[in-house]
Amino acid sequence: MIRRNANGATSEDTEQIHVMQWAEITANRGGAFEKLRMLFHIPNGGARSKAEGAIFKAMGVKSGVPDLFLPVPMELVRDDGDSAMSSGLFIEMKARGGRVQPNQKTWLNDLVDSGYCCCVCYGEEEAEKVLEDYLEGRFPEYGKGWRN
């Protein structure tokens, strides 16, 4: 089922479901792509009752944390040949036309400062390309050097 947002675009959660389905299938390609089995969602969004929201908050859920995490350290090479180590990859998923919120920008900046590669992906195709680039040792085309 494909859900749509108010603008008629495919919803963010539908895009993310497609990314996770793609990752499961692509992990079977072997090699570095086997690491896609480690990709997971951080459940910090969505509508909840006040009671459930309070429980999640007490459990450590934090607003603004990116949606997906791939806990795979990689040495990434830039187009100019320079390289840098990344402790893992965080992806903030957005539906096409979506916007990054201030608390999300804060998290992304703090994570980059802590040695992680972070990308904002508008749709499943961008997220899939970012994951391929990352696992092949390239700085992702989208969200290069995420900054405010």
Image: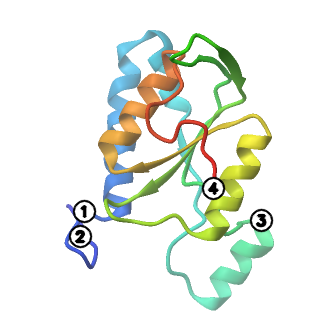
Type of the residue with mark 4 = Asn
Type of the residue with mark 3 = Gly
- The answer to whether the residue labelled 4 contacts the one labelled 1, judged by CB atoms less than 8 Å apart, is no
Q: Residues within 10 Å of mark 2 (few under 14, many from 20)?
A: some
Residue 4's tag is 2
Task: State whether residue 60 is above or below residue 124.
Answer: below
The residue labelled by disc 4 is 148
Q: Nearer the viewer, residue 38 or 80?
A: 80
- The answer to whether the residue labelled 1 contacts the one labelled 2, judged by CB atoms less than 8 Å apart, is yes
The residue labelled by disc 1 is 10
The disc, 2 or 4, on the residue closer to the chain's N-terminal end is 2
Identify the residue at horizontal 35%, vertical 61% (top origin): 95
The disc, 1 or 2, on the residue closer to the chain's N-terminal end is 2
Type of the residue with mark 2 = Arg
Q: CA distance from mark 2 to mark 4?
A: 28 Å
- The answer to whether the residue labelled 3 contacts the one labelled 2, judged by CB atoms less than 8 Å apart, is no
Task: State whether residue 141 is above or below residue 17.
Answer: above
In this rendering, the label closer to the viewer, 3 or 2? 2
Q: CA distance from mark 1 to mark 2?
A: 4 Å
The residue labelled by disc 3 is 60
The disc, 3 or 2, on the residue closer to the chain's N-terminal end is 2
